Amino acid sequence: MVTVENLHRHYRVGGQTVHALDDVSFEIPAGRYVAIAGPSGSGKSTLLNILGCLDHPDSGRYCLDGTDVSTFDDERASDFRNRRIGFVFQSFHLLPRLDVLENVLLPQRFLRTPDPSLHARALELLERMGMSARLDHRPNQLSGGQMQRVAIARALLMRPALLLADEPTGNLDSKSAADVLALIGEIHAEGQTVVMVTHDHEVAQRAEQQIHLRDGRIEHALAA
């Protein structure tokens, strides 16, 4: 499903070169649940951005579901990202002026050809998330756990090949965090490929495979 070969990504900061990723390689089979862990500054966010087609490596190769996306221009990357990758963020990234259903349906606005089946899928996902009674609520009327459930539904709307979760429990209380992690586990159990970035050791242990980064390199990799 995911093949990463010899990825390098560096930035110029204050006249110095920072090697955010330094010769990173790994593979993730379809249906695997993977945690990318490491301290701040280890390269987790940079790697997530490349996996999500939000950034490009300076060199190396990244293939998702048989497609080499590492050389896509911004337009192709944006279209591929909308169709094949789902995102769940720590800060939810819900639009405050849209209600719950409109937020979940947001990805369809970027389709070149409308898909009328997505409305029914959004309703189905929100029912599964326990949010059917709040379709017309705005984000400021929801708890943190509820907002994350809406974000997960939105991430799954397009039936993505890859679900990326960036510290998905970072802004949640312990009960809501446990509920969200259980939900992600259920989604994975149904065959979804999941990659989660976390600095929390206990959260990382829920995954089948762990990739630990330090100073832009893979320090070690663990399998359950």
Image (cartoon, rainbow, N blue to C red):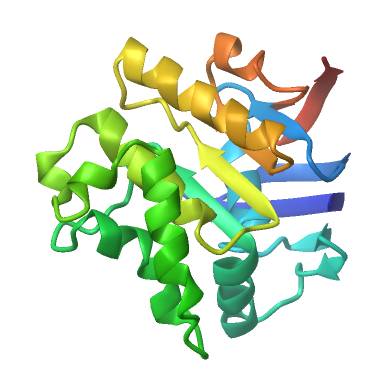
Residue 104 pos. (x, y %): 36, 59
Q: Is residue 123 left or right of residue 57?
A: left
Residue 26 pos. (x, y %): 87, 40
Residue 204 pos. (x, y %): 63, 18
**In the image, farthest residue toward the left:** 141
- Whether residue 43 is visible, yes or no, is no
Total residue callouts:
0
The foreground one among 37 and 141 is 141
Q: Is residue 89 left or right of residue 61?
A: left
Q: Is residue 61 left or right of residue 140?
A: right
Where's the C terminus, which quadrant? top right
- Vertical comparison of 177 with 55: above or below: above
Q: Residue at x 43, y 75 (%)?
A: 108
- Vertical comparison of 219 with 13: above or below: above
Q: Quadrant of residue 130?
A: top left
- Vertical comparison of 88 with 80: above or below: above
Q: Is residue 128 left or right of residue 39?
A: left
- Vertical comparison of 134 with 159: above or below: above
Residue 21 pos. (x, y %): 71, 44
Q: Residue at x 47, y 31 (%)?
A: 167
The foreground one among 72 and 135 is 135
Q: Residue at x 85, y 19 (%)?
A: 223
- Whether residue 146 is visible, yes or no, is yes
Q: Residue at x 70, y 56 (%)?
A: 161
